[in-house]
Structure formats: C-alpha cells, structure tokens
Amino acid sequence: MAAEVMTLQEAAAALGVHYMTAYRYVRLGLLPAVKVGGSWQVSTSDLDGFRDGAVTGPHPGRGRGHRVAPWSERLEARLVAGDARGAWGVVEAALAAGTDLAGIYLDVLTPAMRSIGTRWEAGELDIAVEHRATGIAMRLLGRLGPRFTGPGRTRGTVVLGAPEGERHALPVAMLADLVRQEGWEVSDLGADVPRASFVHAVSLVADVAAVGVSITTEQALEPARATLAALARSAPDVLLVVGGAAVHDGAHAAELGAHAVARDAAAFVRLLESTGEPRRRRRTRSPG
Ligand code: B12
C-alpha cells in the first residue's frame, strides 16, 4: 500500500511551524522528505515519527527503513560534535514535535548528558569534548530557562545550590527551572558555593520556603554536611532538602543533616506543597 504523502507546507501547518522552520528540519535531517518535481513531500508516517522523536521510513540517500535516532541521541550527537546551532535545532524540532519544556530537560538533555558522562568514563570521549558539550548545554538552558514560567503569583522562594567543591552546576540549573515552572521563585546559587556564602544568601530571602542542596559527587558529601549544619543553626525554621546522584535515601539525607531527600523536581515540589506556605522569616542568625 502506498504511503500517504503531503507537501512540506502541509506538514509545516500540521506541526504549527513556519514553512522555513519545517524546511530547516529537513535540511538538518530531522524530518525525512523527498523532492518530487521541485517540491518537498513528507509521508504521514514520517510526520508521526517526527512527532514521536523516532522515525522509521524512507530517508533521502539512506534507503527505506532507516531509523532516525530519538531526540536525546540526536542532541547528544550535536553536543559531541560541538555544534551549538545544530543542538538548538534539535531542541526546536523536539518542541515542535510536541515535547514540553520539562520533557526537553528530563527526556532529551538529561539522557544525552548522562551518556556523554558514560562515554567519557569509558575513555571514548576526551574531557574537552565533554566540557564543550556542557558549555552548549548551559547555553541551551540560557535560551529555554526564561520560558519556564509558573502560573500566577509566586508561592515563596526556594534557594538552590551545590556545596563547596561540587562543580556540577547543570543539575542545579535544570532543577531551578523545573521548580520555577511550578510557581516558586528560585534563587539559584549554582555550584561550589562556600558555606558562609550559602548561609548568607539564605538569610537574605524573606519568604524562603526551602533550601535545596545538590550533591553529585562523593567528595562533596562532607562539605554538604558542613553547609547543612550551618544552615540548620542559622535558619532553624527552614526546610532543608538534599538531592543529586550522591544521596542514597532518606536515612542518608538525615545522616547528612537534611530534613528530607527528593530525587527530582516533581518530588521536591510535592514536598514543598505538603509543608504549606513558607513561614515568614522572624530572624536569622549570623553565618557559621
Ligand atoms: C557535565 C559533567 C561535569 C562537568 C560539570 C559542569 C557543570 N557546569 O555542570 C565537570 C567537567 C565540571 C565535571 C567534573 C567532574 N565530574 Co562530572 N559529569 C558531568 C556529566 C557528564 C553531566 C552532569 C549532568 O549535568 N547530568 C544531568 C543532570 C540533569 O542529571 P542529575 O545529576 O540526575 O540531576 C537531576 C536530579 O538528580 C535532581 N537533583 C540534582 N540535585 C538535586 C538537589 C535537590 C535538592 C533535588 C530535589 C533534586 C536534585 O534534579 C536534577 C535535574 O533534573 C555527568 C554524567 C551524569 N551521569 O550525569 C558526569 C559525572 C557526574 N561526573 C563524574 C565525575 C567523576 C567527575 C569528576 C570527579 C571528574 C574528574 N576526575 O575531575 C569531576 C568532579 C568535579 C567536582 N569536584 O564536582 C561522574 C560521577 C561519578 C560519581 N559517582 O561520583 C559522572 C557520573 C560521570 C561518570 N559517568 O563517571 N563533570
């Protein structure tokens, strides 16, 4: 049975994007299309595949049945190649295909970064390639971040950061946008925050609902413990939450001096909601 086809104009309309945007997807190899008598044609199955992020079907120059990688693999390839424009093209295409903002972070960028880390560990990728990929990832966040706006009035402020020695800033930045999307104001201190500065930054926030400490590496566990102890002394009424790859479970969180652990932004937001409105700060003690 012959596949149903449509013009690229029709495909663009179906995706809700401008013709030139759809044309760019074709040029980037993201949307399979064939040129028939001077105009591009797209099969409905390829359009559906594009929406799903994985296409099986005819692809120019590659024969039938070629499987185009899902969004995360396509993004990973662009990140590894150091191709910032192409990486943004993949993000734009995934958005146009129906992936939401949180999906871009959690289902597209996160697996791409994890795979890059695994490939670096296996000696397949040089550390410079990983650094370059991370730089591009940070710029993608810079473009996407402002789109993560929450509904209505802010529900309070969450302070996020990673302790001294912990250089993994990308998890904190992603978490910040995901929490902001749920209607919380976020003060993102980033990575490698000296203990006294962490405490001081929290003391400046009048409507602090919680502090999230992100720990990715084992070596940051002790600095995290010291930071949490200082926060508990200076802001005893504030909820302290830990998360990140180096935190095992609730018992580990408690042992580090936190009130709770949250695995991801969704769990963190549930925790914030269950503790109610942020308590207005009555007083703060000096950093220690
Ligand atoms: C990019 C990267 C770096 C960059 C970071 C730059 C930056 N600006 O962030 C640089 C080059 C600095 C780096 C350095 C190192 N890295 Co590195 N890095 C990575 C890599 C490839 C990606 C990290 C990332 O962004 N992941 C994606 C994020 C979004 O996922 P995530 O961590 O799960 O975060 C989510 C959740 O955990 C949660 N979350 C996180 N924190 C919190 C906190 C709270 C409160 C809550 C609620 C939730 C929450 O929300 C996040 C968003 O969804 C990882 C690979 C990997 N598997 O992640 C290795 C990885 C983390 N690095 C690793 C290592 C070994 C190192 C180095 C020790 C290497 C070295 N020999 O120098 C150093 C350590 C530096 C230091 N002192 O911190 C290992 C860690 C292994 C381990 N178990 O300890 C990994 C896993 C790579 C690997 N496969 O071996 N790294």
Image (cartoon, helix red, strand yellow):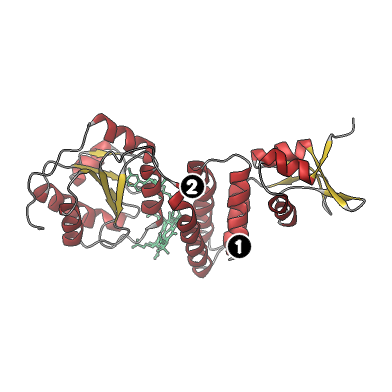
Query: Can the viewer see residue 214 in this picture?
Result: no
For the N terminus, the image quarter is top right
Badge 2 marks a residue whose secondary structure is: helix
Kindly check if marks 2 and 1 are in contact, taking CB atoms under 8 A apart as contact: no
Identify the residue under disc 2. 105
Badge nearest the viewer, 2 or 1: 1
Identify residue type, mark 2.
Answer: Tyr
Q: Is residue 26 visible?
A: yes
Query: Looking at the image, which residue is at 65% across and 38% down?
Result: 52
Q: Is residue 76 above or below residue 271?
A: below
The residue positioned 17% from the left and 48% from the top of the image is 206
In which quadrant will I find the C terminus? bottom left
Residue at 27% across / 45% down in the picture?
242
Q: Quadrant of ligand 1?
A: bottom left
Q: x, y (%) of residue 105?
A: 48, 47
Q: How many discs appear?
A: 2
Figure quadrant of residue 273: top left
Q: Which mark is residue 85?
A: 1
Q: Going by the image, does 248 lie left or right of 136?
A: left
Query: Percent x, y for residue 3?
Result: 85, 34
Disc 2 residue: CB within 8 Å of ligand 1: yes
